[in-house]
Image (cartoon, rainbow, N blue to C red):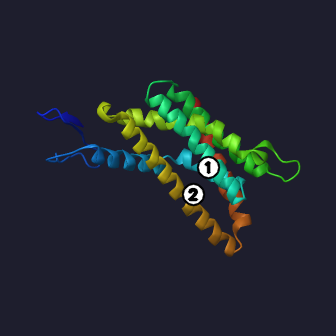
Amino acid sequence: MRYSRSKGHELSLRATSRVPDVNVPKSGGTGALLVTYFYLGIEHILGGVDHLLFVLCLIFLIRDFRKLALTITAFTVAHSLTLGATVLGAVHMPAKPVEVVIALSIVFLASEVLAARKDPARLSERAPWLVAFVFGLLHGFGFASALLDIGMPPEALPASLLAFNVGVEAGQLLFVAVVLMLLAVIKRVKLYQMARPVAVYATGIVAMKWLIERML
């Protein structure tokens, strides 16, 4: 919800289906707006199961922590580029094909995890950052579609875009940290070798279901 005061100062407030009421503050500014879009970014990534499953496959695929950090960074940079470019109007991509390819990216990565081998190494093992970057560009269009549906305050477009993107990255890092801690516990109790293929097969099955549904 956006409104202008008599003195010309515009404010943006957020209402949702769960919290439909808003309180109009006596004063407001960019700070409150940034906090709102930061939390929107966190909520979107933590509620975006398809994006999280893609990151989960990356974690299973890459066992070297340094290479994993580089790959997650490449994914972040890529979807930040297309998110920003789409919201600012520089590029446009229809939503349905993007959703189809996002599901396909998860199916592909899940199959790569199951087919991983040391010699000869597959492209996803030799250069996982490249795979993450390419698919990250497409995932960025998905983030942008959600943000455009929410709406952006024209008086603070760059700031709210930055806050949303930082929120997405904060949520993504939180997810990675939680998964790595859970995997550390699973490894200590000697269940990793069983849990890994079960999780990857389940991810691939769910992503294939999405792929079929999104193509119809």
Q: Which residue is mark 1?
A: 72
- Residue for point 67% across, 54% down: 68
Cβ atoms at labels 2 and 1 below 8 Å apart: yes
- State the image coordinates of residue 11 (x, y, percent, origin top left): 22, 39
Instruction: Choose the circle earlier in sequence order: 2 or 1.
Output: 1
Which image quadrant is residue 60 in? bottom right
Q: Nearer the viewer, mark 2 or mark 1?
A: 1
Residue 2: name its quadrant.
Answer: top left
**Residue 196 visible in rendering:** yes
Q: Residue furthest bottom?
A: 189
Lateral position of residue 197 relative to residue 49, left or right: right
Q: Nearer the viewer, residue 117 or 159?
A: 159
Let me know if residue 202 appears in the view: no
Q: How many numbered marks, from 0 up?
A: 2
Under mark 2, the amino acid is Val
Quadrant of the snapshot with the N terminus: top left
Q: Which residue carries the number 2 mark?
A: 176
How far across and down, in percent of the image, does residue 123 sit? Answer: 78, 42
Q: Looking at the rendered structure, which numbered label has been put on residue 64? A: none
Secondary element type, mark 1: helix
Looking at the image, which residue is at 13% across and 47% down? Answer: 26
Disc 2 packing (10 Å; few <14; some 14–19; many ≥20): some
> Is residue 95 toward the left or the right of residue 133 in the image?
left
Q: Amino acid at mark 1?
A: Ile
**Gap in angstroms between the C-alphas marked 2 and 1:** 9 Å
Describe the element under mark 2 as helix, strand or loop: helix
Question: For mark 1, does the 10 Å Cα neighbourhood hold few (<14), some (14 to 19), or many (20 or more) residues?
Answer: many
In the rendered image, the quadrant that contains the C terminus is top right
